[in-house]
Each structure stands twice: as structure tokens, then as C-alpha cells.
Image (cartoon, rainbow, N blue to C red):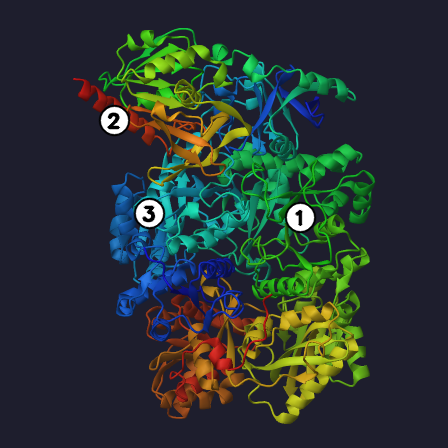
Amino acid sequence: MTKPQKVLVIGSGPIIIGQAAEFDYAGTQACKALREEGVTTVLVNSNPATIMTDEEIADIVYIEPLTVDVLTRIIERERPDGLLPTLGGQTGLNMAVALADAGVLDRYGVRLLGTPLETIRQAEDRDLFKQLLLSIGEPVPPSQSVYSLEEAWRVLDSIGLPVVIRPAFTLGGTGGGIARTRKEFEQVVTRGLLASPIHQVLIERAVLGWKEIEYEVMRDAADTCITICNMENIDPMGVHTGDSIVVAPSQTLSDRQYQMLRSAALRIIRALKIEGGCNIQFALDPYSDQYYVIEVNPRVSRSSALASKATGYPIARVAAKIAIGKRLDEIPNAVTGKTTAAFEPALDYVVVKIPRWPFDKFPRGDRTIGTQMKATGEVMAIDRSFEAALQKAVRSLELGGRSLLWEDPSWRDLETLWPLIETPNDQRLWAIFAALRREAPVEEISRRSGIDPWFIHRFARIVAMERRLLTEKLTPDLLRQAKRLGFSDKQIGTLADLLPEQVRTLRQAWGIRPVYKVVDTCAAEFEAVTPYFYSTYQQENEAEPLAGPKALVIGSGPIRIGQGIEFDYCSVHAVWALQRAGLRAIIVNSNPETVSTDFDTSDRLYFEPLDEESVRDVLENEGLRETPVIVQFGGQTAINLAEPLQRAGALLLGADAQAIDIAEDRQRFEDFLNRLGIPQPPGGAVTNVQEALTVAQRIGYPVLVRPSYVLGGRAMEIVYNATELIRYVTAATAVSNQHPILVDKYLEGKEVEVDAICDGTDVLIPGIMEHIERAGVHSGDSMAVYPGISLSPSEVETIVDYTIRIGRALGLRGLLNIQYVIYQGEVYVLEVNPRASRTVPFLSKVTGVPMVAVATNVMLGRSLAEQGYRSGLWPRQNLVAVKAPVFSMAKLVGVDTYLGPEMKSTGEVMGVDSSFYQALTKALLAAQLMLPPTGALLLSIADRDKPEALPLIQRLHHLGYRFYATEGTAAMLQAVGLPVQMITKRLHQGHPNVIDVIREGLVQGVVNTITGGRSEMADGFQIRRAATERGIPCFTSLDTLRAVIESLAHGGQHYSVRRLSEYRQQPLVEVRP
Amino acid sequence: MQDQRAILVLEDGSAFLGYAFGAPVDAEAEVVFNTSMTGYQEIATDPSYRGQMVVLTYPLIGNYGVNRQDEESRRPWIAALIVCECSPVYSHWAAVESLDEYLRRHGIPGIWGVDTRALTRRLRQRGTMRGVLTRIADDPDLRALTRRAATVRALSEQDLVGETSLPTTYRIPPPNGRSLGRVVVMDCGLKHNILRSLSRRNLEIIVVPHTATAEEILRHDPDGIVISNGPGDPAVLHGPIATVRALLTSGRPLFGICLGHQLIGLAAGGTTSRLGFGHHGANHPVKDLRTGAVHITSQNHEFQVDRASLPPSSGLFVSQINLNDGSVEGLAHRELPVFSVQYHPEGAPGPQDNQYLFDYFVDLCRSTRREKR
């Protein structure tokens, strides 16, 4: 095969459940690997918050919607001779198939690299897949594909319940599920047929309770095949692997079984002729050697990212090199520097992965887990014992300090626990521990949960240690044993009646400190050159402190709503900036999906939980006084560590705990702004219902209420009356009475956001962003436009002035994010965040100001002036960029989708063009919020919004849309003479009702606004869920709808497709060393 | 298992503390490490480990217990087992007892709670060392233990093959009665999966002791001969070397595995030497120099055939090499039906990727026999 010269790499688009940061890791590794081989890379992604879309990573970057039209135009312009579709998740694979089907690849002579088209189809089309496996003698569960419910009923007769229903060509099991009853069967099949783009589902016998084992396999063009590792899902078959607690390598398989499945995996990758990486999932009978092949992903996947981090083997990098014709034994092993990529990693530790579910944000959502993935992210921990790896992983989840000791107050006896143990859910692990504490037999827990007894026995060892810590006197021996089982100082303190700090002091006195060992792919058989470490309580420390000037960057932990990939982007850029400044950069993080946890990103990687204990241990290992810490880039995770680390004697670079406290302590913040004469919405901090009512009465309803010290607007609400306020405050104080609740006047104005860099004297504002949705919608869920196109010059001037004064007065060195609201011509400060915000990657990319690098240099003592910047607003670029949020609501059953002050989106996309409407259209397209040019809409508008909605509806009418509307809304339309079909929202009063209209595909979009009260919201809940499940846009803010209308009316569809650098038309400031 | 403390002391004076399991006896032997993540039972019962304590680098051992189907010989041969953690409970449908019980029953001691990575790094840096494993009550006399370690007899001074090889000749009929050929396997301390792999191919197998002469072997009129794996230093095995030398020119297909491979190298006039810390694991990449193909192999050996030592007149050439260190992994003959591999095509533990070599051997037996007729 001749080596391609120019390769198109398709990214995975926005972060959604089932497709998270792992594809930034994969795409970034691939681009770097291809560059090493002298291949020019053309990278396309709609997600700006990625390292792969940095112009230092790919040679040519397009931030454009991932559609066939756009990709065709890019191929036309760039004329790549190869397309690498296997690194952009399911999105990348689906786009490649669509381009091939449209004849685009043939027309322009683009060769598909890595995985043949036929293989993609074979792995995705369940029938072809089954035929292929049977032809090579690999067992598959009895199954059949169907295209309709009637067909499904016929098939069920021969297969029998329970069954798994898998829609073809969907991601993360979207729309699929397990059916144990005929009723469930009907529901899931119907949903699955809708979810599949080709309306095909597979009905498959469910082997519930069998072990689920995965293999990561690689193959090169010379047919050399290797496995990178295998993984055992602790949760047996029936739970999506992305929602399973996973351990690597497998723990309960004998070598015979390990090799049996390994050999099968090699046969499968050979039959599929994949050149690159592949993930294969097996079900293994716990009572025999019988197995079934369950699934094959003919591409780099979430599991590959986990396997890469678990073993140190860079799967995506090697896959990219194989795709352009390299053989495994021609690729050097970056870990040892001596051997080649043709070997299989040997682990001398155990790895535990736990998914991070969003139910802390959506407590009312359906918390059960099954074949449809619900986790937004995951954490990984490494140790030399299973117990310690598990407990470190739990600490890494950052569930408000919740260790395995946590129990829900409603858990009493075993009878209350069994349902949680029998039906998988996000709290099952804790419920099992609670059951063990209540003397439930290991075998019974195993039988009821389907989890192998070996794991339950290990859990029981943790519980046994809890008892010892509760009852015995703490001795050096006992403490060491507890640390070896992964108990945190805090847990030990709780059990032994000590403060965490006292446990730490005891540890130091007794010489019980963690040592750090290397992840080296070879179990110490060869000397490793990679600086990838994990902690353990054993004899030998391999991490001698790094010599010379250095700094430690605290990462951002698992991807969750409110703290996404943006902060990994910032952490990675901080590392690079440190290195350019001549420092050695150390990173601590717990997230296996990210670029920051690639072993070649930093000078040293500690894969550790991001809590006080672990970070202090790392700092003490490196030298507390020799290792300054950067907390600005890791989101709230890192910011929360500022105060304890400073107290422990760490040197913080940039923001100190003082500035953070001013920004987050309501009273201090108010005094601070008063001194500067800068207005903020009136309000106050309260700690009980009485105070809350007093404040609200003084400032008047509606009020915005939220707890202090949070990120992602968690539990933030707009409250319209005293009843609602009492409910909110009562609930919030029940959770935590440590931090007060903030009650502010809700100003329904235009929201504006700035990111700035301060050096103590000067304040540089790279750009101003204006939100499309008015204040009240969380900034992370709002569409935002750069530059602030509708702001008056005097408003811009005021914002710049306030920002500079706040930056100076805070005495901050580094990044600053301020949110303003413009209400009746006056600018108010809503929020000041003395840290990197989620808009930093977006703004860096559109303005060309390398914000993280500049901020890092400032922290290191180089002023803005020295770096060639000065105070004020950076010249506006000759482009418009629109950021739009992306939600994963289809995966989260029972979660309401309306936009409010609480953040709900999982990712974002960017549309950029030389004019607003084109940029807007691209953002809407990429976020799948765009309406088709014609069609019908369902309208259900709250009374409060009707006057404002009417002109919008009239414009939609002129654009040619037809309407269905609920009772009140229909009456309004009829009154002004607009044609409308009234449709009832009373679901129990005959058909068709609003849900039927949506489910039957009669409408292409829904407009549903709410007034805020809980009861009114329940009304529209069914409508919004139905729209989500049908996959059509649902607008809950008239501002978003207005944006769509503007885009439609102004010919936004005539957008351009250009390189990011062409839009900016300005040379980038050099960012890589 | 928590109570009894134990210590491993190496001849360089380094000491590793832990807790005792298995049999309550001391061990004095060489210490080697194995990087396989599964297969402790197969490792324990591999006769090639006779005279060696084995450190398992994977930290969680014993999880799936011990079963009846994965024995690689009639008993475990390792001198002792050194692990980070030996699971007190096991979970597997085929398991019949715990690893602890199994080792105790066979009189083999173990130590757990050891920082096996630190120990492995030590062995990698300093090479394979001798050591003493003993149970302790109070502070151990490290100096005395170090001295004891330094007096452990070298592998080459022990008759390890004699201890592991059975002194009798026995026949294994083909599994379904119809034999596709007859092979003689010379037992130098063989692993049962070699026999299973041959038997699965419907061969009649005659196993002879390592003391069998070429004449005795050829008297069975075999279609092919397998020289098995086994423990220790091949260079001291003068009898078997002479036997193999005679077999080389017999015209019968000859297949050497591990020690058998070394014996073929020596018989052909080559030399062998010790590797720094051996190859013990299930992940060694081997490249076939004739085809360029790379295979993952299972390995367990201390000695290697020296690459440049084979006289050209022997007709043998290096057919395969280890991708990690370039050492010899396979030999083949230019004219004669003779070939050998340093690794274990039978796996157990380890990959089954090289089972094709048994197919190749069977084909070779068949074609040679056809020519003969």
C-alpha cells in the first residue's frame, strides 16, 4: 500500500453521553502520529473544546458541522487521498459510510483507511455480523433483525423472553434495552425502531447474568494480531459496558478461558480484515466455558481509551500508523523506547473504572441502568490491590466526598436494599456495601446481583476492615493494612474517630506514605522511560522528585455536566505553556478519556484521585516547597483544592484562596463590588427559610436562588413566589447547611460573558460573548455569539471598564470569567469566576489569543506587557462565531429538558463564518437544532410568553410552516387568523393528543415554554420528552426559536466552508514549543 | 494467612518481607519472575521451573483457585511461589481447592505481601539471583540468610531433568482410535499440553524418557520425533545431546520445543548461554525471519542458543528471533525436516497462536513418510 499524503480525520462532534472526551484523545494521538510520518492531516470537528482542533495538532483545521454536505465541500477543497474514519467514534464511522454511499469518496479518489467499508457494514448491520461470525465458527446468541413491530412479535415466539433489543447504527445503545415482559418488549422495540436511522432492530436472546468480557485487539496489514488487554465488567451482562464498573485485566478467568476468548478475538479481527484497533465483547457463562460474541466495534472506542490508559499502550497512535501502512513491528514502543509496538502489555497492577452518572444533577431521572448508556464520563484508578483501586476510583468520582461508607438515609434493613442490588442502578455499589454491613451473605448478594462472588468477597474485605477500624486501637500495622486496602485518611478518621489531618499526622509519624510505581506495559521486565505513575502502599518508590524548576497542574477529573472537556483543554495547554517556559510540568488527573492523561502530554503524570489527600501526597513526594500548583484550569475540582492546599503549605500560582473566597463568599463579594461602585442585582446570602423570605420580600420576586460554591449552576432555580422559595430553601438546607444559599433579584435581561487575563496591573479581554437566550438560562446551556454583535459601544465600554477594575482589584494573576446582565440599559455583574471558564477554548480559537498560555506565563511572572499584550479589548476578529449547547436527553429517561438556570447540556458545538446568520445556521445544524425548510410545528406556549411568541409564529407562518397547537395557544392563533390545528394536551381525553402528533412524525419541531411553577412544568414534561425521544428540536426558550427564524429568514443556509485560519485571517500566535 | 511472617533474602543481601502461605517449609533456589497475568497453576506445574522460585508480577493470584484440567504435569515443580497477594477465596466453576491448599498439599512454600515489582526490578537490574525463603518470628539474621542464599547450588550442578522426566516409556493411543501417524516424544520434563496438542491431531504418541537412545527411539519407527521442554542448563545434558545428534540425521522429522530446541542447537555444534534474567511470560513477540510474520509467544527459559554459534556445515539456520532482544527463537534446517522453537507453541499458560506449528509438524511427518515410501 502506498502511503497517503493527505488524510482527512473526522472527529466525533460534541460531547454527548456515549461519545465523550475519549475521541479527543484518539483524534489528537492520531494527528500527532500522522504528522510524525510526514502525512498532512485535515481535521474536521464541530466541537471547539478539543485539543484535536488546535492548529498545532492537525495541519489543517475545520470547525464545521459534521454533515455530508460540509464534508463533501471540504473534500472538494482539500483533495485528501485518504480518510481515517475510525477515530471519531460512531459519528466518524457513520459519516464515512454516508460519504461512501453518496459516491463522494469515489468521485474524489479518497481511500478509506484502517477499516474497510464492508467491515463497517458487517459490524453495524446485525444480520451481516451474525453471518460473518457463524461463517468462522464463532457462537452468537440466537437473534433476528426486524423492521417492524409485527415482525418483532413473530420473532419473539422463536427466541423467547428475556431479550435484548439493539437498534442498528446507534451510539451507546440509544433506543435499545432489555425486555423481560411482553409489555416492555413492545415499548423497547417501538423506541428502537425510531432510534435506528435504518429502522432496524435486532431481537437477541439475553444472556443476563453471564460475565461480560472485552478484548482490545490490533491488527496490521501483514496480518500480525495482538491483544492490548482484556477487561472484565463487574456488572454482568445486561448493563452497557459504558455503565459498568470494569476491572482490567480480568480477575475471575482462568488462563484457559482467557486464551479461549483471546483466540476468538484474533479470529474475529482477521475475518473483519481491520487494519487498526477493534473492541470485541463476549458473554461468558459463569458455570462453563461456553461463550457468545456480543458486539464488535471496528474502531477506536471508549474501551480502547480505557485500555490505553490502563496499559500504557497508545492504541489510537498505533492504529493511525497502521492505517497508513506501517507494520506493528515497525512502530517503536514509546514506553520502553527499545522494543516495538508488536507485543502485548503485561500489567502488574489492577485497574478499576467506574462510570460517572449525572444523577446528582438529575435526581428525578430514572436511575436504573441497562443496555442504554447514561454515564457522562468515567474515572479510573490503579493500584496493586483490587480493594485499593476500587476505593481510589470511588474517591475520584468526586461525589461530594462520598466514600464507600456512604449510605442513603432511607436504607434500613436488607429488605430495603435488595431491590437496589437486584436491578442495576447508579447506587448499587453502595447498596451492596450496606448489605454487607448488615451481614448479608456474600453468596446471596452474588446471586441477587449476578456479580461474581470473587468481587463480593473483596467488598467484604473492605467491610471487615471498616469493623476493625471501628473497634480496634489504631496501630501502625492496622493503619498500613487499611491504606493497602485503599482507605482514605478521611474514611479512617470517620471510623477511628479522628480528624483526617490527625490520621495524616499519624501516618507521617509512623512512616506510612504512598510510593509511586510506573505504568510501563511490561511489568518491569524492561526499563521504562515513560513518566506515568500511580500510588500504592508498598516498599519501593520509583518516582524520585523531578529535578529543576517544575509546576503541578491539577486536572478536572471525570466529565460531568457543568465540568466538561473544556477544562482538559485548559490543563493540557497549561502543561505546554509551562514546558515552553522551561519548567517541567506535572499533571494529576483521574480521567482515562482525556488528552491530559496521555503519558506524553506532560513531563510526569500521576493518575490519582483529585482530592486533598492524594494531591498533597503527590506534592510531598515532589517537594511541597519546590512544586508550585496551578488550580485555575481544572474547573471547580481544582478550585476547591485551593484552600486546603494553601493551608497545607502549597504554593499556588495565580489565583490564591483569598481571591477565590471573595468571588464565592456572597457578603465579601457584595462589599467588594460596592467599594468599586459596580452594581450587581440586589440580593443576599441566607441560611434559613426566614432569612430567605425576608430577602425576597426586600428585592421582590422573581428571584434566582442557588447554593454558594458550585459550578454548573447545580440546583439553581428561578423562584416566582414564597411557596416555591420555602420548598427550595428547605430542601437545600437539608443537603448542606455549611454553605449559605444565595437569593438574588432575577433580572430578565441580556446576558453577556467575558473571559479576561489579569497580571495584577493590566487586564486583557480577548473577547466579549453575548448570549442568545436571556438571563435565566444557564450560561453553559445558552447559545453565545462572539463578538457581542448587538451591544452598543457604551455597553461594551462599560463591560470593559468593569472587567479591568474587577481584575485589578482582585489582585488576580491569571484567568478571570465574568458574567454580566444588561437590564434596562444598566450593566450588572452576575458572577465572577477567578479561573478558566468553559468558554476559554472557544474564545482562544476564534480570537487567536492563546489564552491559557498567556495566563500561565502571567502566573510565572511574565506580565502581559512583556508578552506583547495590553489592557483592554483585543481587536475584534473579522468573523462571527456561535457556540451552541448539545444535550444527551434521549439517554436520560425521566429528565426534563427545559432550559433553566441549572445546566443540562453535555457538550457544545461552534459555528463560525464571516457573518452572523451563516455562523448561527452552522451552530444550529451542528447542534441538531435546525428546523427543516418546511414542515409543521407543535406549539404550546405559556400565557406569560404569548404576546412575545405571536410575532415569531407569524414569521414562521410566512416562512411556510404549518402549526398544531394546544388549547390556549390554538385560540390565540385563531384569534389572529392563523391556520392551526388544535390538539389536546390532555393525554387521557382521546386521540390524537400532543404526544401522538410527535410520535407519529407529524411535526418537525416543538415550541414549548414554561412559566416556572412546578405544576405547569409537569404539563409540558410529556411533550418535551416525546420530542427528545423522537429526536426533533424542542424549543423552551423563545430566544432560541427567534435565532432559528432569523437563520431561516436570512438565507443562513448559504454558509461557507473554510479552514479556521481562513476565517480568522490573522496569523496565530505561536503556541507550541 | 495473615499471622505467619516470612522473608525472602537474595544473595545480594536484599530482603523482602511478607506473610507465609502454602507449606511450612523453607526454600532455597534461584529466583525468577514471570509476567503472565493468568495461568499460575500451569506455571506451578511446568517442570521447566524445577530448581526455581517463581515471582509472579501480576499482583492478584489465586482468584480462580486450582482445577483438575490445567495441570501441566503430575505435580507442581516450583521451589516456592512469591506473590503480592494470594487470594484467600476463589471463584470458578472448575476449581476444586484454593492455591494455598494446593501448594500446602504438595509441600511447596509461598510468600505473599511482597512488593513483587521492587523484587522484579531488582532481578532485572542484577540478573537472576539465588535466594532463601523462610518463615520468621522475630528479627531475622539477614547476614546468615544472605550467606545461605549464596550457597544455593547452581542449576547446572543439579540433575533437574532427571528429577522431572519419567523413567518409563508409555503410549497414548489416538483419541478416536484411528491414528494419523506415530510420534515419539522425548520427555525432558515435558508439559502435558504438548501431548494434548499432538493428541488432538489424532496421533499415536509414545513418550520415552530423556535417557532413551536414538536407537531405542527409532525402534518405534516414528513418523516424527518431538524433543520436549525441560528444566535447567542444556549444556550439561550430554546423553540427550548425543541422542539428538544421532536423530538429526535419521531423516525423521524432528521438532524441538524450548529445552528440546537448545538440545538441537547443541547437537548441531552450536553453543548455549544464560540470559540475564531469562524469558518468562506470555507476551513475547517473535518474528519469523522467513515470512516477516510476528507472533506472540509463551516463554519460559533461562538459556539461549547463541546466534552466531551454529556452524554453517550444520545446515541449521536461525529462522525466528525475539523482537525484544534479538535472541534466537527458532531454528530450521536447510534440507532436513528438522525445526525447533525456543518458545512454547502449546501455550498453557499463554497464547495458542502458535498451535500452527503442530499442524506444520504433522504435515512434515506425513510428507516425509510419503517420500519414504
Q: Amino acid at mark 2?
A: Asp
Residue placed most toward the observer, A1001 or B306: B306
Q: Report how far apart the C-alphas of labels 1 and 3 lie in the structure.
A: 38 Å
The residue to which callout 2 is attached is B363
Q: Position of residue A81 (x, y in %)?
A: 34, 65
Residues behind callouts 1 and 3 on a single chain: yes
Rendered image quadrant of residue A748? bottom right
The residue to which callout 3 is attached is A204
Q: Is residue B230 left or right of residue A562?
A: left
- Please, which chain is the residue tagged with disc 1 on? A
Residue placed most toward the observer, A786 or A30: A30
Q: Amino acid at mark 3?
A: Glu
Q: Position of residue A936 (x, y in %)?
A: 35, 80
Residue A162, visible in the rendered structure = no
Check whether the beta carbons of the residues at disc 1 and disc 2 lie within 8 A of each other: no
Q: Report how far apart the C-alphas of labels 1 and 2 lie in the structure.
A: 61 Å
Residues behind callouts 1 and 2 on a single chain: no
User: What residue lies at 74% left-to-right and 78% top-to-bottom?
Assistant: A807
Q: Position of residue A180 (x, y in %)?
A: 39, 47
**Secondary element at image label 1:** loop
The residue to which callout 1 is attached is A403
